[in-house]
Each structure stands twice: as C-alpha cells, then as structure tokens.
Image (tube, helix red, strand yellow):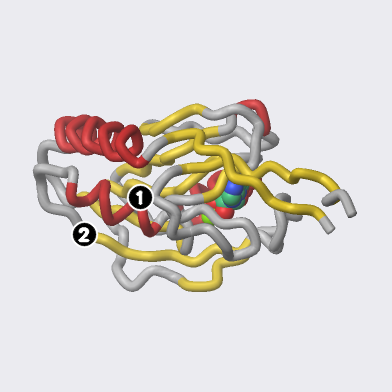
C-alpha cells in the first residue's frame, strides 16, 4: 500500500490574483470583436469561470471535450474529441482555455483542428505550464504559472478524477510503502 500526500504549491489567493491580471491583459488585447473562449473539459472549467469574470468585455463561451487516453499521471499521446463545440468559430477571435500544458500533444492537435474552422485568430490561455515536459511545440500566449516537472492536482486538476475541488494547487507525493 502507498499513501498519497498533498503539498500546497500555489495558494488560492495567488491563483485568484494571477487570474485578475490575466483578465485585464486579455481585455486590453481584445478591445473589439467577437471573443470566443473555449474551455477544455473537465479540468479547465474552474479556470474558465474565474477568467471570464475577470474580463471587462463581453465574451462567448463554449466547451470542448478531449480525451488523451490516460487515467493516471501520463497520457498515451492519442487525442480524440469527445464533445464538440456548439457555436461556429468563423471570423471569431478564439481563446482556448486549458488547465495545464504538459507534453503539448493535446493543444498541438487542437490548434490544427480549430484552425480549420476559419477563426480570425486563435490563441491559448493556460493556467499552468510545465515547459520541461514539452514533446510538441505549442505557443501559449497567456500563462498563469510556470511550474516544475511535478504532478499537480486541485483547482480543476485531477489524479484519477480525485481532488478537482481543492481550492489550492497541490503536488501529489507518493509517500511510498506504508510501514507495517
Ligand atoms: P498534454 O497533452 O501532455 O499537454 O496534456 C495536457 C493534459 O494532461 C491536461 O489537460 C491535463 O488533463 C493532463 N495533465 C498534465 N499534467 C498534469 C498534472 O500535473 N496534473 C493533472 N493533470 C495533468
Ligand atoms: Mg485536461
């Protein structure tokens, strides 16, 4: 048996302060036009709802489900759309909202898929970025925090579907075998 310990990496206050900054920056960068924010389910839902409320302009929201065929700490690299968008992106400024960029496989794939729908522009906002882990190139225009190569949970992020509702972002540490 191994026990799981959680260590706080980014507190709720720091997350919320950074999201307010990102909201201001995005509002300035998109002064006019139709802004469509696309939330990648499920993990980015927490970031998405806070980020939209940090904007001082109007926004359309939509949700997309992506599966990377992984239930533990790693994904296999195979990407599939499990829930598609409801609204057309033609002529819109699109902002993909993701919880974390790790290998880059998911977002690299998604950029190609969404680019075919004739948006005016596409950018990415990600709350967390683990640049050390990148396998595919991805340009992230709005990054909340760069973090080291550690597995994190909370504020939407899960480990086997657990811990999404934690307010802070925490590192999962396997404590190893429990002494008898
Ligand atoms: P990528 O395709 O490898 O960039 O993976 C991105 C997806 O992997 C994210 O949307 C998360 O669902 C998941 N992921 C990557 N790193 C972590 C982590 O540290 N904690 C929880 N989920 C993660
Ligand atoms: Mg995800």
State the mark number for residue 47: 1
Secondary structure of the residue carrying numbered label 1: helix
**Residue on which the image places disc 2:** 60
Cβ atoms at labels 1 and 2 below 8 Å apart = no
> Which numbered mark, 1 or 2, is in the foreground of this view?
1
Residue 131 is tagged as none
Q: Position of residue 39 (x, y in %)?
A: 38, 57
Furthest toward the right, the residue is 180
Q: Nearer the viewer, residue 171 or 101?
A: 171
- Spot occupied by residue 118 in the image (x, y as percentages of width and height): 36, 54
Picture layout, residue 17 above or below residue 75 = above
The residue drawn where x is 55% and y is 49% is 153
Residue at 49 percent across and 66 percent down: it is 65
Q: Is residue 106 visible?
A: no
On the rendered structure, is 81 left or right of 133?
Answer: left
Name which residue lies at 46% across and 62% down: 41
> How many C-alpha atoms fall within 10 Å of the one at disc 1: few (<14), some, or many (≥20)?
many
Q: Nearer the viewer, residue 19 or 32?
A: 19
**Residue 17 in picture, x, y percent from top left:** 26, 33
Residue 38 percent location from the top left of the image: 35, 56
Q: Classify residue 29 by image quadrant.
A: top left
Disc tally is: 2
What residue is drawn where x is 36% and y is 55%? 46
Specify few, some or many for label 2: CA neighbours under 10 Å numbering under 14, 14-19, or 20 or more: few
Q: Split into 4 quadrants, where in the image is the C terminus?
A: bottom right
């Amino acid at each position: 048996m191994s026990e799981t310990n959680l260590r706080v990496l980014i507190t709720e206050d720091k997350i919320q302060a950074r999201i307010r900054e990102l909201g201001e920056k995005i509002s300035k960068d998109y002064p006019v036009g139709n802004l469509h924010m696309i939330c990648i389910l499920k993990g980015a839902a927490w970031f998405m709802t806070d980020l939209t409320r940090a904007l001082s302009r109007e926004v359309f929201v939509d949700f997309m489900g992506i599966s990377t065929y992984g239930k533990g700490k790693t994904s296999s690299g195979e990407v599939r759309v499990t829930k598609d968008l409801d609204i057309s992106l033609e002529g819109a400024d699109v902002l993909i909202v993701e919880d974390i960029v790790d290998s880059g496989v998911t977002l690299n794939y998604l950029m190609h898929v969404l680019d075919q729908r004739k948006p005016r522009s596409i950018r990415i906002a990600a709350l967390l970025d683990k640049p050390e882990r990148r396998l595919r190139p991805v340009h992230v225009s709005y990054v909340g925090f760069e973090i080291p190569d550690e597995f994190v949970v909370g504020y939407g992020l899960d480990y086997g579907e657990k811990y999404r509702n934690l307010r802070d972002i925490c590192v999962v540490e396997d404590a190893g075998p429990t002494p008898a």
